[in-house]
Amino acid sequence: MNKADLIEAMAKAADCTKTQAGAALDAFTDSVTATLKKVTK
């Protein structure tokens, strides 16, 4: 599964657009990345 497949699956599961699902995925990954950077410092 690649990012586009994941976005499509999220959009179907959440009954939203692919654009909205993509934004949610990007927000999630940005949040996780920022948290991990803080923990590893």
Image (cartoon, helix red, strand yellow):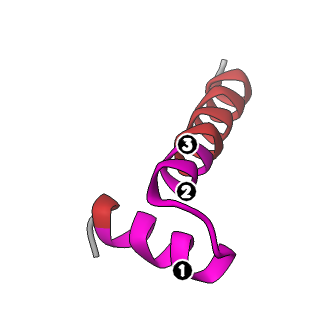
Numbered badge on residue 12: 1
Task: Name the outermost residue toward the top.
Answer: 41
What amino acid type is highlighted by mark number 1? Answer: Lys
Q: Residue 22 at what x, y percent from top left? A: 48, 50
Identify the residue shown where x is 55% and y is 42%: 23
- Alpha-carbon distance for marks 1 and 3? 14 Å
Q: Secondary structure at mark 3?
A: helix
Q: Secondary structure at mark 2?
A: helix
Identify the residue shown where x is 26% and y is 66%: 2
The residue labelled by disc 2 is: 21
Point out the stretch of residues depicted in magenta: 5-24
Identify the residue shown where x is 54% and y is 71%: 10
Contact, CB < 8 Å: mark 1 with mark 2? no
Q: Quadrant of residue 28?
A: top right
Q: Secondary structure at mark 1?
A: helix
Contact, CB < 8 Å: mark 2 with mark 3? yes
24 to 11, vertically: above or below: above
Identify the residue shown where x is 58% and y is 33%: 30
* Label 1 CA crowd tier, 10 Å (few <14, some 14–19, many 20+): few
37 to 30, vertically: above or below: above
Mark 1 vs 2, N-terminal side:
1
SS assignment for the magenta stretch, majority: helix
As drawn, is 38 to the left or to the right of 33?
right
Mark 1 vs 3, N-terminal side:
1
What amino acid type is highlighted by mark number 2? Answer: Ala
What amino acid type is highlighted by mark number 3? Answer: Ala
Numbered badge on residue 23: 3
